[in-house]
Image (cartoon, rainbow, N blue to C red):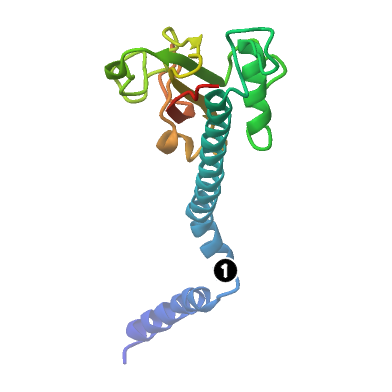
Amino acid sequence: MTTERKTSFWKSRALRGPFRRLLGDRKGATAIEFALLALPFFVIVFASIETFVAFAGEQLLANATDTLARKIRTGEITFDDSSKPGFMTETQFRQAFCDEIAILMPCSATEAAERDKLYLDVRNITDLTQFPPAVPRVGSSSSSDLDTSGFKFAPGGAGAFTMVRAYYRWEVITDLVRPYVTDLRPAGSSMPRDFLMVATATFRNEDY
């Protein structure tokens, strides 16, 4: 082997030594793997928690709607005669609804008088073909803001057909999950921010 070839051989071997040691060193492998997998892992974890809590909130809203609807149907809550023991105004009814969902969806101090997150539509249905078929929205998009202009508080009396609809703006906490689960874009906003929960009960009041 010539002198030049020997020199080249030892130089290449000397260079391979540090790289070989670097590739063989596993001390920081766990940290690097964690850094690469942490973001998708936590996104999945928070998305799972967010979905679970939102599902529980939907069930709570549905239960509250059924509970208040049953009280209207049986005459335990009335609206047409202030002399009756179960008489409630709209504000009192909203407060009763807030009390039903307070364990997971607390209302603000002014929610009973001023709608913020909770929206209730209680009305007497005289024409059974006129039940609202869908969620009222301001625009045609499935993420448009909720249209509350037609909401009423006019429940029927004994023997009347009544509909109770409840809507709640559920705030999505996790920023990374928000664009994929929100479906309510407030007016003036370019991106949905809240998840709209909906519960409906339709029934005929008893002859109380």
Q: Residues within 10 Å of mark 1 (few under 14, many from 20)?
A: few
Does 20 appear above or below 100? Answer: below
Q: Label 1: which residue?
A: 30
Please state which of residues 55 and 14 is positioned toward the viewer in this rendering: 55
Q: Give residue 39's position: percent from left, percent from top.
A: 51, 51
Q: How many marks?
A: 1
Residue 111 seen in the current view:
no
What type is the residue that disc 1 sits on?
Thr
Which residue is located at x 67 percent, y 15 percent? Answer: 92
* Helix, strand or loop at mark 1: helix
Q: Quadrant of residue 179?
A: top left
Question: Which residue is found at the position 42% from the left and 23% from the top?
Answer: 191
Q: Position of residue 48 (x, y in %)?
A: 51, 51
Which residue is more in the foreground, 47 or 75?
75
Position of the N terminus by quadrant: bottom left
Q: In this view of the protein, which residue sits in the foreground, 124 or 196?
A: 124
The picture places residue 186, in percent across and down from the top left corner, at: 45, 17
Kindly tell me whether residue 26 is visible in this rendering.
Answer: yes
Note whether 22 is above or below 62 in the view shown.
Answer: below
Quadrant showing the C terminus: top right
2 displayed left or right of 155: left
The reply, left or right, for residue 95 in relation to residue 195 is: right
